[in-house]
Amino acid sequence: MRAKAFCPGHVTGLFQVCQDEDVMACGSRGAGLSLSLGVVSEVEVADGTGKVDIWLNGLKAAAPVTERAVRTILGDRPLDVRVRNELQLPVAQGFGTSAAGSISAAWALAHVLGVPEGEAYTAAHLAEIANRTGMGDVAGIMRGGIELRRRPGLPPIGEVERMNGHMDLVLAVVGPSIPTAEMLGRKEVLERINAVGGRGVELLMREPTLENLFRLSNEFMEGSGLATPEARRAVWEAKKWGWASQAMIGNSVFATGPDLDLLAGALSAYGDVYRCSVDLKGPRLL
């Protein structure tokens, strides 16, 4: 038995980490957007002993977030699961690949096992929180489009609204990856993130426009201490041609503007460039 599913990637512009004893209420407040590029998972299930093997872009790999999500859906069934994830964007660059890979794999497996596909969100959220790899990506992907995460956690505990708007995007990877778990594990960094991020989210909730999303993301980028020299330079260049900010938490940039060819050309001087758009459909079987 096999199935294939796609899950959009996700970019966060600003955020505030929110912890809670109830893991379903953990996560973040913030804002971001789902991407038309993400992860395609092909899942194959056979009789066995509960073994889970995962390949990333053709190479067998340890993928703890995806594995945990898959095992949550699998439960104690005596089945072996093979997951082949094809990533359309780089890992550890703020593009939500760990969330997308865990959702798409769990989504495909749920289809094979006859489990409600919505449980893939729960499985992925639990896996992300446990591994501290993305505190709000799953909730954002669940809502789709351009989202404002008003209350932390996975809906319905969390409150996530979709903002008006749609845009084509240029993504650029401008430097070495930033490990999210490591950054969020540093107390002084987390305190600064939450102080600046909390203020930014409050301001965006008062006037949730795309212009404010990018403006407040720029303020968060600088005020949080997460901005890298490479990201600063790339954002400064991209803002000559449109709106841009740093993808959190990554050494990367997301940008939009009236002339994407011009924008992509400008950003290509700083690193690898990807063209995509905001995804409105969410995870889906292929």
Image: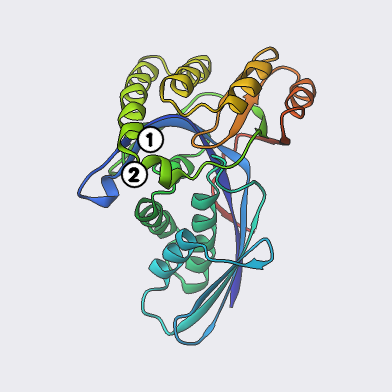
Q: Give the position of the C terminus as an image quadrant.
A: bottom right
Instruction: Report the amino acid beneath label 1.
Output: Val
Residue 59, relative to residue 246: is it above or below?
Answer: below
Tell me: 286 left or right of 136.
Answer: right
What residue would you read off at disc 2? Answer: 155
Tell me: 34 left or right of 77.
Answer: right
- Whole-number angstrom distance, CA of label 2 to CA of label 1: 7 Å
Report helix, strand or loop for mark 1: strand
Q: Farthest residue in the left direction?
A: 21
Query: Which of these two is toward me, 35 or 143?
Result: 35
Instruction: Report the amino acid beneath label 2.
Output: Pro
Q: Position of residue 101 (x, y in %)?
A: 54, 56
Query: Which of these two is toward me, 231 or 114?
Result: 231
Residue occupying the point 46% across, 17% down: 219
Any mark on residue 250, and which?
A: none
Q: Position of residue 246 (x, y in %)?
A: 55, 28
Count of numbered circles in the view = 2
Tell me: 102 left or right of 2.
Answer: left
**Disc 2 + disc 1, Cβ < 8 Å:** yes
Counting residues from the start of the chain, the first of labels 2 and 1 encountered is 2
Where on the picture, by quarter, is residue 184? Answer: top left
What residue would you read off at disc 1? Answer: 160
